[in-house]
Amino acid sequence: MPRILEISQLGSPVIRERAAKVTDIHDPQLQTLIDDLFATVAAENGMGIAAPQVSVSKRIIILSPKPNARYPYAPTMEPTAMINPEMTWGSPEREKDWEGCLTVPGIRGLVPRHLTIRVRYHTPQGVQIETEFDGFLARVFQHEADHLDGVVFLDRVESTLDLVTEGEWQNIIASRGPL
Ligand SMILES: [Zn+2]
């Protein structure tokens, strides 16, 4: 049975480390970790998760966007594991929108991200995928990939004035809807 893992919080050293590249995709322990990450992100209602967030400093992310109370405008995507993900191109056009993070509870921030990106990653089966994401998916990818370099969304805000508490953010999106 997959386990729900504990989320590392900001201040834990693993959150600020550069994660190591995965060298053996077929290691059975890696498949177990991926199953646990799927279970954990589902239990936490996250749009994605990165292995360092469960204290494993390896280059693995999960994207699992779906609409919920916090992100009513999120697209639905089958939860997808990406090993050694890389952004190979980012559009000059950027967009600011709200982000939160399981590692930084209680805070939301307006974060500028590339609107469109090209990415490369390996599936858990070892197949290399090259594809393009835009909008919300591009944002979730950039957020999760940042975790592999020890970067959190707080580092990306243009101003600390773009940070709000979760309670105030609920008021903002209720009155205005998505950007
Ligand atoms: Zn995060």
Image: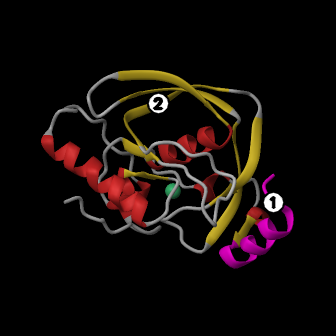
Please say if 179 is above or below 40: above
| Residue 28 among those drawn in magenta | no
Q: How is the image coloured?
A: secondary structure
Which of the 4 image quadrants contains residue 164? Answer: bottom right
Residue 7: x %, y % from top left:
38, 67
Which residue is label 1 attached to? 177
Q: Quadrant of the N terminus?
A: bottom left
Q: Is residue 58 left or right of residue 96?
A: left
- Position of residue 106 in the picture relative to residue 51 (left or right): right
Name which of mark 2 and mark 1 comes first in the sequence: 2
Instruction: Identify which residue, 77 or 96, lies in the foreground.
Output: 77
Instruction: Please name the amino acid that badge 1 sits on.
Output: Gly
Residue 111, position as x, y percentages in the image: 70, 52
- Tag 2–tag 1 contact (CB < 8 Å): no
From the viewer's perspective, is residue 125 above or below residue 42? Answer: above
| Residue drawn where x is 63% and y is 65% of the image | 70
Name the foreground residue: 154 vs 164: 164
The one nearer the camera, 96 or 72, is: 72
Determine whether the residue tagged by mark 2 lies in a helix, strand or loop.
strand
Residue positioned 52% across, 51% down in the render:
151
Q: Secondary structure at mark 1?
A: loop
Q: Residue at x 48, y 65 (%)?
A: 103
Question: Disc 2 or disc 1, which is closer to the eye?
Answer: 1
Quarter of the view holding residue 60: top left
Disc 2 target residue: 86
Q: Is residue 4 above or below residue 62?
A: below
State the extent of the magenta-drawn residues as a range. Answer: 165-179
Apparent side of residue 162 relative to residue 133 in the rendered image (left or right):
right
As measured in the structure, the alpha-carbon distance from the residue carrying label 2 to the one carrying label 1 is: 31 Å
Q: Disc 2 residue type? A: Glu
For label 2, the crowd category at 10 Å Cα-Cα, with few meaning under 14, some 14 to 19 and many 20 or more, is some
